[in-house]
Every structure is written in C-alpha cells, then in structure tokens.
Amino acid sequence: MLATALTVGAAAAHAAPGLSESAQQLLQWIERESDNQNRPFVLIDKPQARLWVFDGQRRALADAPVLLGSALGDTSAPDIGTRPLSRIAPHERTTPAGRFVLEPGENHKGEDIFWIDYEAAVSLHRVRSAHAGERRLERLATPTVADNRISYGCVNVPTAFYDRELHPRFSRAPGLVYVLPDQQALHEAFPRFTRGTPGTPAKGAASPPPPR
C-alpha cells in the first residue's frame, strides 16, 4: 500500500513541471496523507519565488512568479502584525513558512486579498507598489529569482493571475497554502511532515490589520 501511495504521490508531483525536489517531497506527503482534505490549495516555493495552484484532488492547475519578503527567514516576529511598516526592521521582512489556512478578506483599504497569516499581517494579493522605484512589475517579469525579494512579507502575484486563478477559486471558501522554507528543513516548517499524523488545524484569522 505504501509503495502504491508513493507512486500516486510522485505522479501528482510530476503533473506540476518545474517543482523543486523539496516541493515534490511536500506534494507527495500532501497526497499520501490527504493533508489538504480535498480542499484546493496553493504551494509557494520561496527559493524559486514561484506559486502553484492545485485543485482538491491535488492536480496542478496553474503557476506564476511571486514577490516575497525582502529578508530570508521562515518565521515572523511575534508582534509584527501590530506594528506600522516604518517600525519593521529590514531583517524582519520575512515571509513565514508553513501550512496556513488561505482565507479571503480585505486589507485596510477595502481591497480583496487572501490572508496567509493574519496575526503576522501576511497576505497574498495582487502586485502593487507605493513607490515606482521598487519596480515590482519588472521584478516579476525577469527570469531570475534574485530580484523577487522586495515586500515586507506579503506575497505579490501578477494581477491577471490573481483575477483568473486565485479569486474565483478561493474567494468563496478558505483553501490551504503551503509555504516552503528558505532555511528550515521541511520537518521544521511542517512538523507533521515526518510524523504523518492527520489533521491539526492550520493557522487562520478573523479581522483585518494592514498587510505588509
């Protein structure tokens, strides 16, 4: 049975060309444990600065480049969601790794977004920039991942991709998001990855701070 499950998991991973070895391992585990509970999900590979969308049967549907927190790191400072952007130090501008509930919501301007970690004010949203010098659209368009680190921690995706692939699929009911680590091992970012125990709740949220 285990061999069969691993074969099925590998097939699922192969359905998403371009996945890194770590992303394939995680996807095989999601398949083997049915960890997504038949819900659609997003997989974000931080080292590759890329996002994949999967349906509830773990079939790859679409992928796109992303912009991420400018600092390497896999955790958020405990009080970071309560601070104004001006008080977030450069080394704290991380996109946290782990398994989260992807919840539809709004930012402080009333724009629709998806919360990744509400308490840390980390969301997934359309690319936008308050400063032209950040060149966020240009960064998304380049073939290298070296310039995809620019945000305070939020995940930015191309607007057309957000409107076509994310908003219709996740706006009516929460899905899941798996964020691969920069520095941690998989079992550190996903504690159940090695234990294989079913169904503990992922992080979620309820009412909006300004995302970073």
Image (cartoon, rainbow, N blue to C red):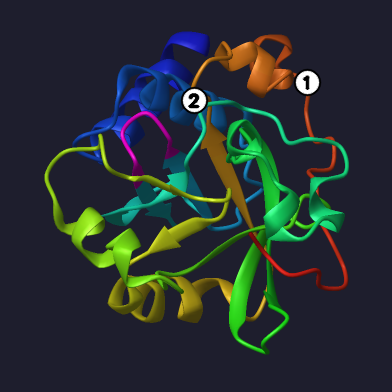
- In the depicted structure, whether residue 128 falls above or below residue 54: below
Q: Is residue 72 magenta?
A: no
Report x, y in % for residue 89.
66, 39
Q: How many marks?
A: 2
Q: 106 or 130, which is in the foreground?
A: 130
Horizontal relation, residue 11 to residue 51: left or right: left
Q: Residues within 10 Å of mark 2 (few under 14, many from 20)?
A: many
**Which span is picked out in magenta?**
45-50
Q: CA distance from mark 1 to mark 2?
A: 14 Å
- In the depicted structure, whether residue 128 falls above or below residue 76: below
Horizontal relation, residue 203 to residue 48: left or right: right
Furthest toward the bottom, the residue is 110
Residue carrying label 2: 26
Amino acid residing under circle 2: Leu
Residue carrying label 1: 197
Q: Quadrant of the C terminus?
A: bottom right
Report x, y in % for residue 171.
60, 79
In which image quadrant can residue 93 be found? top right
Residue drawn where x is 70% and y is 17% of the image: 196
Which element type, helix, strand or loop, lies under badge 2? helix
Report x, y in % for residue 181.
53, 25
Horizontal relation, residue 154 to residue 115: left or right: left
Q: Residues within 10 Å of mark 1 (few under 14, many from 20)?
A: few
Q: 152 or 21, which is in the foreground?
A: 152
Report x, y in % for residue 6.
43, 17
Q: 139 or 208, which is in the foreground?
A: 139
Amino acid residing under circle 1: Thr
Asked if the residue under mark 2 is in contact with the one under mark 1, i.e. CB atoms within 8 Å, the reply is no
Horizontal relation, residue 61 to residue 40: left or right: left
Main secondary structure type of the part rendered in magenta:
loop
- In the depicted structure, whether residue 165 falls above or below residue 94: below
